[in-house]
Each structure stands twice: as structure tokens, then as C-alpha cells.
Amino acid sequence: MDITKQTYEREEVVEKYYDRYLTAPEYFEIDIPKLVKTFPGKKLLDVGCGPGQFSRIFGENGFDVVGIDYSKAMVKKAKSLSSDENNPSYRVMDMKEVKKYFKENTFDVIWASASLLHLEKTEIPIVLKSFKYILRPRGHMYLVIKLGEQGTVLLKDGDLGEGVVRKFTFLNEKWFENLLDGMNFSIIEKRLKKGSVIGGRPSNWGHYWVKSQ
């Protein structure tokens, strides 16, 4: 089992993760009202939804939300916090397999906040291609990634529990933007937020709000 997935299957880790990111929009400095007004439609996929912080917010704002996560423990927590059995709906699913479960042109919006960073660099183009397949023409994506010296590190995070290890992949800013351009995604808005030093590497959070052409 992937070491990050193994970590996220621990219920005590999920509880601490939930507490840490309870106010995720404020932590990431995301202007939710602005996005809600501008997104092109109401069918939204939350990739790597975790305990469902963003899924619930968009559901409360009138979106038809599907939240997916490869951690059964995360999905269980998300379901336990939902007041509506049907919206958001949550599924245990690996983001690398979305084409198996969703038809072409299913979603108006794909939301992936701090989820692509758990992939290997070589997997990211494949996953983005799958996202484009299930995204409607002129659909939007909002991606929050880690930018820095390109490569993958294993992060030990004692604040989430004893022996907690997660995989983080840092991407080069230009490499990622060239990748988006090559897939015919245009950048609507780009923001950088200073991140912590991880494994000796300074990092930034890269916020990419993009549109499919």
C-alpha cells in the first residue's frame, strides 16, 4: 500500500487532519464567494476530498458535489459530517482511475486542493488528461499544488501522530504551466502562498484556477 494512503487510513490521523484543516479556505486564503459566482456550472468533483471540508462548502452553495478520496477512513469521516445523504456524495476512489467511473464531459468544475502533491511527477500528466476527459468543454479546474525544487520527499509529520509519513511532490512552476498549456488549459488566475520548509526544501503553495479550451 502507498505510504501516504497507509497514513490516511489511520483514524487518529484523520481526526487530527480534520482539526488542522477545519478552516481550510482561510488557511489556503481562497475566496470561495468569488469562485461560486464565477464557476461555469454546478456539477463539481472534489478530488482528494479528505474529510470533506470543501465538498460541504460547495454543497451548501448550491453545487452538486461528488467527493472522492482513496482513503476509506477519510471518506467515512466526510460522510459522518454531512447533514445531507446525497449532497455531497462521497466515494472511495483513486484519482488515477476517474475515467473508469465517470463519463466524458461529466463535470463543470474539478477541485483538487493539495491532492496532486501526493502523486509522482510522472503520474500528473496522466491524471490531468483524465481530468480533462471528464470535464465539460470550457469547464474550470482549481488546483492547489506544491511548488519548489522539483522532486519527491517523504515528510514525517509528528503533529498528525506517531510515525506519520506522507509523500510530497514538488513541481517546478514553469514545468507545470507548460503542462497546462500543452493540454489546452488557460490560466484564469494564479496565486502563490508561501509554504513551509519541507525536507530542507523551501516551498510555495501554487493556486491555479484554469479553464479548459
Image (cartoon, helix red, strand yellow):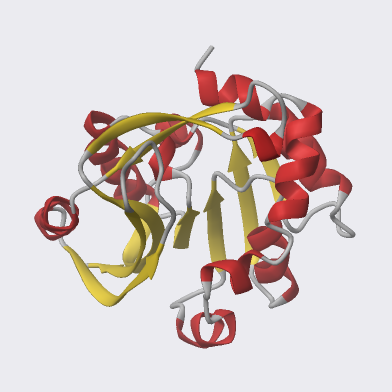
- Quarter of the image containing the C terminus? bottom left
Q: Report the side of 99 relative to 63 (left or right).
A: left
Left or right: residue 10 versus residue 210 is right
* Nearer-the-camera pick, 194 or 40: 194
User: Which of the 4 image quarters holds residue 162?
Assistant: top right
Query: Residue at left 34%, top 40%?
Result: 200
Residue 10 lies, with reference to residue 117, above or below; the image says: above
Question: Observer-nearest residue: 14 or 133?
Answer: 14
> Splitting the image into 4 quarters, where does residue 144 fall?
bottom left
Front residue of 11 and 108: 11
Q: Residue at x 47, y 45 (%)?
A: 115
Q: Position of residue 90 (x, y in %)?
A: 70, 44
Relative height, residue 144 to residue 6 (above, below): below
Query: Residue 188, percent across and down?
Result: 28, 78
Image coordinates of residue 71 in percent, x first then y, are 65, 30
Position of 146 relative to 97 (above/below)? below
